[in-house]
Image (cartoon, rainbow, N blue to C red):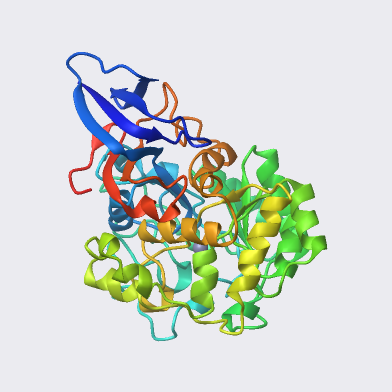
């Protein structure tokens, strides 16, 4: 069975190819050209743009989150702490009603360290909210390995939440090795003293422990990412040789020195402007009001999107946007990410899939070209995370595709005009 998508425009992950016919078969892109093969199922889309499926480079997710993401054209979610490691996701790889996923497993953090402070003292993870495990107090956003998701007969494992708690370089080395063996796709480090979450003095990895963990991950050939919300935590992460920053700092305006340090290091930055905005008390209500979004939100997600973290109201979003622009000017690879997790009001301002579109709009607000923003959610992300089979529209790549009415290469808001989504060539009827 072949499908020929006759698109008014194809954006291949890097540039606009103009009007093209993209033929997909057996879950892959078979050809890109001007001809429609005989017998193919034809999708006529003269006023539409075909894009690679979008990638959210910072989530905490579960089956419900992956299903929702796919409805918004997000065909891959990269989890930055959670349960969806290689050992636990065979069912997701084969289920074309869900976005695909990669995961860090659990992030290295000291006992009592981030993200414990995010959860209200009376929060009960057993009742808290998400299907497939709300992540809960000890674990942070993103599900509980060995919990409800564990299949009968699967080997009993010691809870990796506990095992990712480290305070010394030796423990960091040991835990990185354990995460690698347990199927983490990359290694995540929490570098957070709690200052922007209203919890100053939070236990935090020290430089030596961070250095040792990053070095061990590199020795094992693994990519490393750091959660850092302040300039100081960013500097520590860069000093340790981190490959990517999973957040953009929000505590202060950027300086030439920090921009230069990031650029010289070669690290990528998953900006998560939507998360910084939520931390500053900016809700996703405008997005929730958009009819292209509203119809895809459950009541729980609607109220979550209309909420916000609101831990750092003194922050300035203009500063964050200026930092995005400065990083781009310095040649830093910027990636689209959201930090979306569970439908809980204290993790609000975000929703799976929907917030990716808002992040794209923030990149353009920051002064980036719409095509740069789109690359940051497709080709650049695939390159930096070594996902060679996706992120671009090219022959032989996965047929993970998003078809939208209009032209997001000039009008970024058109990405929300979702008309069709394909995952491994499987067309999503709900889109
Ligand atoms: Zn996160």
Residue 228, by quadrant, is bottom right
> 262 or 141: nearer the eye?
262
Give me the residue at 59% from left, 53% from top. 368
Q: Is residue 418 left or right of residue 375?
A: left
Residue 114 horizontal/vertical position (percent): 57, 71
Q: Is residue 211 left or right of residue 420?
A: right
Seen from this angle, which residue lies furthest right? 257
Residue 89 horizontal/vertical position (percent): 36, 44
- Can residue 93 be spotted in the picture? yes
Residue 6, by quadrant, is top left
Give me the residue at 22% from left, 31% from top. 43
Residue 1 horizontal/vertical position (percent): 20, 21
Is 169 located above or below residue 219 in the figure? Answer: below
Is 183 located above or below residue 82 in the figure? Answer: above
Give me the residue at 78% from left, 61% from top. 258
Residue 167 horizontal/vertical position (percent): 68, 66
> 280 or 140: nearer the eye?
280
- Can residue 229 be spotted in the picture? no
Is 206 located above or below residue 314 in the figure? Answer: above
Q: Is residue 99 left or right of residue 212?
A: left
Tally of marks: 0
> 137 or 332: nearer the eye?
332
């Amino acid at each position: 069975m072949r499908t020929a998508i006759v698109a008014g425009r194809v954006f291949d992950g890097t540039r606009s190819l103009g009007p093209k016919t993209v033929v997909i078969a057996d879950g892959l892109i078979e050809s890109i050209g001007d001809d429609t093969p005989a017998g193919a199922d034809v999708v006529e889309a003269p006023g539409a743009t075909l894009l690679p499926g979008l990638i959210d480079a910072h989530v905490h997710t579960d089956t419900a989150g992956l299903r929702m993401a796919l409805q918004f054209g997000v065909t891959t979610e990269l989890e930055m702490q959670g349960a969806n490691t290689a050992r636990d996701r065979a069912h997701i790889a084969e289920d074309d009603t869900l976005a695909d996923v990669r995961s860090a497993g659990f992030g290295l953090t000291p006992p009592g360290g981030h993200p414990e402070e995010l959860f209200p003292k009376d929060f009960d993870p057993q009742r808290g909210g998400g299907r497939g495990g709300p992540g809960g107090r000890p674990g942070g956003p993103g599900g509980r390995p060995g919990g409800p998701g564990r299949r009968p007969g699967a080997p009993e494992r010691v809870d990796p939440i506990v095992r990712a708690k480290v305070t010394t370089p030796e423990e960091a080395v040991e835990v990185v090795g354990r995460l690698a063996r347990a199927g983490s796709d990359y290694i995540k480090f929490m570098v957070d003293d709690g200052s922007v979450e209203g919890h100053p003095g939070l236990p935090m990895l020290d430089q030596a422990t961070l250095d040792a963990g990053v070095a061990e991950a590199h020795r094992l050939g693994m990519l490393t990412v750091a959660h850092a919300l302040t300039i100081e935590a960013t500097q520590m992460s860069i000093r340790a040789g981190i490959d990517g920053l999973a957040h953009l700092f929000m505590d202060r305006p950027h300086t030439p020195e920090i921009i230069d340090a990031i650029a010289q290091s070669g690290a990528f930055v998953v900006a998560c402007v939507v998360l910084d905005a939520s931390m500053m008390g900016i809700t996703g209500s405008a997005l929730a009001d958009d009819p292209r979004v509203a119809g895809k939100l459950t009541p729980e997600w609607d109220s979550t999107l209309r909420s916000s973290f609101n831990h750092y109201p003194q922050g300035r979003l203009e500063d964050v946007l200026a930092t995005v622009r400065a990083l781009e000017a310095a040649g830093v690879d910027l990636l689209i990410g959201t930090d979306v997790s569970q439908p809980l009001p204290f993790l609000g301002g975000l929703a799976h899939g929907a917030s990716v579109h808002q992040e794209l709009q923030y990149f353009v607000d920051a002064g980036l070209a719409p095509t740069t923003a789109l690359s940051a959610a497709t080709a650049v992300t695939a390159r930096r995370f070594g996902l060679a089979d996706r992120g671009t529209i090219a022959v032989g790549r996965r047929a993970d595709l998003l078809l939208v009415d209009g032209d997001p290469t000039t009008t970024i808001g058109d990405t929300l005009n979702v008309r069709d989504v394909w995952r491994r060539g499987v067309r999503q009827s709900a889109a």
